[in-house]
Image: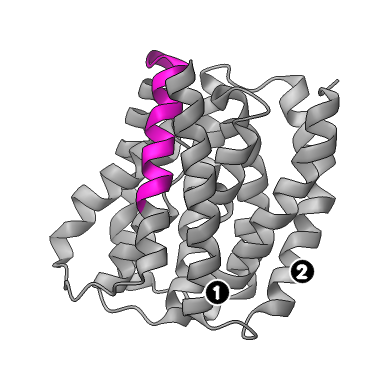
Amino acid sequence: MPSIEVLIFAPLIIVAAYLIFGMSGFGSTLIALPLLAHLMPLKVAIPLVVVLDCVSAFGMGVKLRADVWKAEFIPLLPFLLIGLFAGAYVLLRIPPQWLLLGLGVFVLAFGAHFMMQRKAAIRLPRWAAAPTGILAGTTSSALGVGGPIYVFYFTARGATPDQIRATVPAVFTFTSAARIAIFTGLGLFNTTILMTAAALLPVMALGLWCGHRLHGRLSRNQAERVIGGLLLLSGASLLARAVAG
């Protein structure tokens, strides 16, 4: 059975994470993983969140499928797959303390980016799908997070907010399903992880429902400031934990 700390705090973390996801189309793993990492090893937290992400992203992707930007989504897929395998290798080989440190730095960097809300004037060429896909796939498998990279890429390719909110879940559906297959082959799933994920599905659904209800009531800038503040706090706590050993 999961520990008492997991039973108490994991549902609260999942509600908050998927409320953000329902509002913006990304951010669930950025919120969930740094906080869950205080309750369990990353090699447990990442497979757990992958299962939840697969279900939530599929449901949201179906709901918003009309706005999926297929012309930019499809070219990413083969490069994402390369990165997913590379990240799984890193997850197995790198010591947990270094993974925590890497996740903390990643989360802090994007938290600062969201808080400053500086909109990049960069316009990426089509060939950028290759390095972007490999990088995002690697961080998705190794650290459990890739959403901000997708958002940056689609924004720099000229996507509208509605296209981003629909296309990022479509990417998550692909990467989550692929990671489930890869992690299963590597033996990273066990009965406890699957039982915990199943128990958290209703809580995830509640968070998504609340997020859909709140979508439109907060501007994108306001939502990004909320995400940024949460990321700064969770990223700093992860760094402190990694440094303290």
> Is 20 rendered above or below residue 193?
below
Q: Residues within 10 Å of mark 2 (few under 14, many from 20)?
A: some
Q: On the picture, is 163 further left or further right than 183?
A: left
Q: Residue at x 65, y 41 (%)?
A: 51
Question: Residue 195, can we see it?
Answer: no
In this view, the residue in front, 174 or 49, is 49
Q: Look at the magenta stretch and give its main secondary structure.
A: helix
Q: On the picture, is 61 further left or further right than 104?
A: right
Report which residue position mark 1 lands on. 65
Report which residue position mark 2 lands on. 209
In this view, the residue in front, 204 or 99, is 99
Q: Secondary structure at mark 2?
A: helix
Q: Residue at x 58, y 66 (%)?
A: 61
Q: Residues within 10 Å of mark 1 (few under 14, many from 20)?
A: some
Q: Is residue 1 magenta?
A: no
> Is 212 rendered above or below residue 228?
below
* Residue 93 % position (x, y): 38, 14
Q: On the picture, is 88 further left or further right than 30?
A: left
Quadrant for residue 148, please give it: bottom left
* Residue 22 % position (x, y): 64, 67
In this view, the residue in front, 190 or 229, is 229
Q: Tell me which amino acid carries mark 2.
A: Trp
* Residue 194 % position (x, y): 75, 30
Magenta-highlighted residues: 92-109
User: Which mark's residue is nearer the viewer, 1 or 2?
Assistant: 2
Q: Earlier in the sequence, mark 1 or mark 2?
A: 1
Numbered badge on residue 51: none
Q: Secondary structure at mark 1?
A: helix
Total label count? 2
